Image (tube, coloured by chain):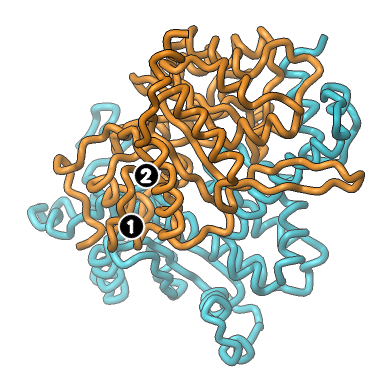
Chain colours: A orange, B cyan
């Protein structure tokens, strides 16, 4: 019975400050059969809300690896408060899997009860800040634990926005006690799409609040007028420029659990393990300047 | 100044349907045209939702082709947007939609194939609930047998169709063109039982009588109501099969409503 999990004999749930891999269905069997040298896995919460085979695989993998639950559909920017049914599904899955981390996005994806199918950026206003903080509070109360909130990749900004996204995240963390999931690729993509400074974004995040980092590949879309938009499609290797920004992030924040995400054109598991090894090598480098930056 | 709700409504409208221009007023106009920025989300959202339908309806997609499927799916999504991000739950109305979709009118069997695929998909994703062990019935007094009411396993689906959707489904997903060509597409009543057991999801044909009895057993009828003459060979074999395959999750020997009110007999 390779897919049977034994409750009570799991590895501890804490996510180490090393590189993990985003686990998708095509690799369930390979992970169980080969036990790859990956420190931890992260899954999309919404993929395991039913019963049957996916959940059996997840429990089997959980018995050998720490797991993180990464949600893509709770809509922390929902003006009507969180969807109680969806929240309940997350709470039940978390109780069953005992994840080391639970995270969601600084975004909205539901309007008047209709789910739109993508993570949309919020107008960064005081009003949105109140909405997000209320929803994060409710999420953390329902789970009985801290969550992490991730900066989204974005292709548009709103005229109404009055607060920088990095500052917005910091205030949400201060007011709710949540942590920050710093997606380095998203910072790179958003900064390029809006002509902003990715390094300034990193510098605005307080190291103590950053509990996890994400890395992924993206593509460049040529628009008809010759302009370019960077698209966060999680469909290729991490770009050299994003690796460079990641080194800056590790220097600033110190070693943090770091995830390789790859969701489209999913490659062989070995490719993901190789990307994770690259991230681990950077995480394990001495980062002497951290103490100084922390104190700043 | 617009409220967050107003901005989200305008952007949601723009993502779901032809743009009324309202959303563009809210988007910063720098470097790249707001319409181009918004269209990235429109495309991503459509790809996600069409993808969810593709996962649930692989045989329908193979039957109509990827391009037709995407076109139909986009119209369906506009008419029936998902109400949750748990997308395994999305798409239950697709069969009825296809039945009323003029462009698919000639494919008379298509809605039934979709009904079967939805049953299979929802059985695959049904909650984990332990099956009733037949041994649990052993200690019952004979006088209690009439009052047994079963609770179906949450993965059980009973379908009443008019085309051989099971044969089409297997041939299409198996890539068996010869079998597909041999299927007689004359409409005849057909009953299918779908259930997720220990070996995965199984699709079994039922006779009309088996379907009637199964429907009663799965709707909470007492055995005495489901089958006054319980010694019928068909009934005994059917009940034994349901129990052996784990198609029930529990049973009670009292009327649930009366028991809940404290008047159980």
* The C terminus of chain B lies in quadrant: top left
Q: Is residue B123 visible?
A: no
Task: Mark 1 vs mark 2: tell me if same chain.
Answer: yes
| Residue under the image location 71 percent in, 67 percent down | B66
Image location (x, y in percent) of residue B264: 22, 34
Report the front residue among A126 and B56: A126
Residue at mark 2: chain:
A
Number of the label disc, if any, that sits on residue A46 = none
Position of B198 compared to A244: left or right? left
Position of A253 compared to A30: left or right? right
Position of B217 compared to B102: left or right? left
Image location (x, y in percent) of residue A112: 68, 27
- Residue pointed to by mark 2: A41
Whether the residues at callouts 1 and 2 have beta carbons within 8 Å, the answer is yes
Image location (x, y in percent) of residue A238: 55, 47
Image location (x, y in percent) of residue A218: 63, 46
Element at label 1: helix
Image quadrant of residue A210?
top left
- Residue pointed to by mark 1: A31
């Amino acid at each position: 019975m390779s897919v049977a999990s034994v409750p009570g004999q799991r590895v501890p749930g804490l996510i180490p400050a090393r590189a993990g891999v985003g686990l998708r269905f095509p690799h369930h069997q390979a992970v169980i059969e080969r036990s790859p040298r990956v420190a931890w896995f992260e899954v999309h919460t919404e993929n395991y809300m039913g019963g049957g085979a996916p959940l059996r695989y997840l429990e089997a993998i959980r018995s050998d690896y720490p797991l993180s639950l990464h949600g893509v559909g709770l809509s922390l920017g929902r003006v009507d408060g969180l969807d109680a049914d969806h929240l309940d599904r997350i709470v039940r899955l978390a109780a069953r899997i005992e994840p080391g981390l639970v995270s969601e996005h600084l975004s909205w994806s539901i309007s008047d009860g209709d789910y739109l199918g993508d993570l949309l950026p919020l107008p960064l206003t005081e009003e949105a800040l109140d909405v997000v903080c209320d929803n994060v509070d409710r999420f953390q109360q329902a789970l009985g634990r801290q969550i992490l909130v991730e900066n989204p990749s974005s292709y548009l900004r709103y005229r109404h926005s009055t607060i920088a996204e990095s500052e917005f995240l910091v205030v949400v963390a201060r007011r709710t006690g949540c942590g920050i999931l710093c997606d380095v690729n998203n910072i790179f993509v958003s900064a390029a799409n809006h002509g902003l400074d990715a390094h300034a974004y990193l510098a605005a995040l307080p190291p103590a609040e950053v509990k996890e980092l994400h890395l992924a590949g993206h593509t460049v879309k040529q628009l008809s007028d010759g302009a370019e938009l960077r698209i966060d499609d999680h469909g290729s290797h991490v770009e050299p420029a994003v690796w460079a920004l990641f080194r800056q992030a590790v220097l600033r924040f110190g070693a943090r659990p770091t995830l390789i995400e790859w969701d489209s054109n999913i490659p062989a598991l070995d490719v993901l393990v190789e990307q994770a090894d690259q991230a681990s090598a950077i995480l394990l480098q001495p980062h002497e300047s951290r103490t100084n930056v922390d104190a700043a | 100044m617009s409220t967050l709700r107003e901005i989200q409504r305008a952007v949601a409208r723009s993502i779901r349907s032809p743009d009324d221009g309202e959303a563009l007023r809210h988007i910063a106009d720098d470097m790249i045209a707001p319409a181009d920025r918004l269209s990235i989300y429109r495309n991503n959202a459509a790809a996600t939702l069409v993808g969810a339908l593709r996962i649930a309806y692989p045989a329908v997609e193979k039957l109509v082709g990827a391009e037709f499927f995407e076109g139909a799916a986009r119209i369906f999504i506009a008419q029936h947007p998902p109400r949750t991000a748990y997308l395994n739950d999305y798409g239950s109305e697709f069969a009825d939609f296809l039945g009323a979709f003029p462009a698919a009118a000639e494919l008379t069997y298509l809605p039934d194939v979709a009904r079967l695929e939805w049953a299979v998909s929802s059985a695959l994703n049904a909650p984990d609930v332990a099956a009733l062990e037949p041994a649990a019935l052993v200690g019952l007094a004979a006088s209690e047998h009439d009052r047994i009411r079963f609770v179906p396993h949450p993965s059980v689906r009973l379908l009443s169709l008019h085309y051989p959707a099971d044969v089409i489904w297997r041939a299409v997903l198996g890539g068996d063109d010869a079998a597909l060509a041999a299927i007689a597409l004359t409409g005849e009543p057909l009953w299918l039982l779908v259930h997720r057991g220990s070996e995965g999801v199984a699709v079994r044909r039922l006779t009309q009588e088996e379907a009637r009895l199964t429907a009663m057993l799965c709707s909470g009828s007492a055995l005495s109501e489901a089958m006054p003459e319980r010694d019928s060979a068909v009934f005994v074999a059917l009940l034994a099969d349901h129990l052996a395959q784990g198609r029930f999750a529990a049973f009670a020997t009292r009327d649930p409503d009366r028991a809940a009110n404290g008047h159980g007999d």
